[in-house]
Amino acid sequence: MPLIIVTGFPTSGKSTRAKQLHTYLSERIKTTTPSGATPKYRLHLISDQTLSISRSVYDLSAVPAHTRSANASEKDARAAIYGAVKRVLSDRDIIVLDGLNYIKGWRYQLHCEAKAVHTPSCILQIGCSKERSREVNEARLSREPAGARDAQTEGNADEEAEGAYEPANWENLVFRYEEPNPMTRWDSPLFTLIWEDDEEQRRRVFDSLWEAVAGETRKAVKPNQATVQRSRDADGDYLYVLDRETQDIVKRILEQQGDEGGGEVKLPRGGAQGEEDLVVELPGSKKIGLPQLQRLRRAFMGLNRGGIGLEGVGNMSPSRIRESFVGYLNDTFEKDG
């Protein structure tokens, strides 16, 4: 089931909305599950707090200027979140990912992971003005005693407590925030809740979100062709079949051609019984040797090896490979003749 990525400014109300969404989805799953039956979906809420990730990992003020672009603590935090998401991501799990999620490349990576397991993803953006978010952060800073702030820095804050960011860290995160763009596939569908939205509006947004990613009208998700392992048929791997069939044709040509060269060599298609044989028209000027045939075979394999994974080439049957190689030889002999 879907991956729901919550994003927005720091201290803009993301965790509050994520918990409201988690409650809504829990109720929705219960109402759609018949009495006594096992729920169709499992629900997960993943956030910095559930993974005990301190908010200080995003603070670049303590990092030397020349290493800020490679902030190791933030990368380690994202790796922990990524692992937690990937462990439970499946077509039976709904994941609410609460966090900054401010980097579009990070959202794209999560989108690709969801697409690879045939499950949809969407973005829930929490809209809040910079001024209001700053006020919330300053209010939290004023309420926090120094000891509690130090505990959060060490990652020992209570899970239910909403910590504050240091002012410089907060400004930096707002500056680095990359707004979701619904025109891009990894940021769509995009749903927005703003600070002032009441319960009725929140319910409408959550209903629309459910219908888009878990309702009966949701679109089927197909993974990118490059990430799908090509199916193997009974004859074996495509490269093996390509090598085997072309080697067999070269062997038969060497065995059947005359001493003077020229003539025709008939080859079986390798398909169903009763099919017409393939015919290789050899040049009459000279006998074709093994080195020349091997060069042509390697050239043919090079042309067709690049299509592995493409449906039109990667699923070529042995008979189709033989027909294509014979046609390639006839065209080459005609041009050289």
Image (cartoon, rainbow, N blue to C red):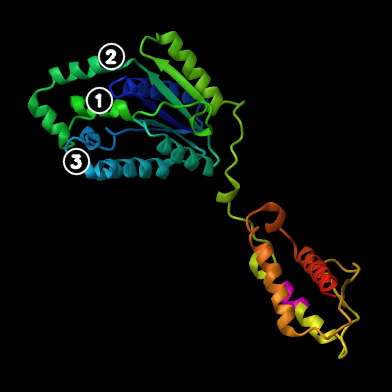
Q: Is mark 1 on a helix, strand or loop?
A: helix
Q: How far, Cα to Cα, is label 3 from label 2?
A: 27 Å
Q: Is residue 150 above or below residue 73?
A: above
Sequence-wise, the earlier of marks 2 and 1 is 2
Residue 35 pos. (x, y %): 51, 26
Q: Residues within 10 Å of mark 2 (few under 14, many from 20)?
A: few
50 inside magenta stretch: no
Sequence-wise, the earlier of marks 3 and 2 is 3
Q: In this view, does 94 lie above or below 76?
A: above
Q: Which amino acid does label 3 sit on?
A: Val
Q: What element carries label 2?
A: helix
Q: Give me the disc on residue 171.
A: 1
Q: What element carries label 3?
A: loop
Is residue 16 visible in the rendered image? The answer is yes
Q: Residue at x 36, y 13 (%)?
A: 195
Q: Which amino acid does label 1 sit on?
A: Glu
Q: How far, Cα to Cα, is label 1 from label 3?
A: 16 Å
Cβ atoms under marks 1 and 3 closer than 8 Å = no
Residue 284 pos. (x, y %): 89, 82
Q: Nearer the viewer, residue 228 or 180?
A: 180
Q: Give me the disc on residue 131.
A: 2
Give, as a single range, the part of the protein colored magenta: 244-249
Q: Give me the disc on residue 63.
A: 3
Residue 324 pos. (x, y %): 79, 65
Q: What residue type is labelled 2?
A: Glu
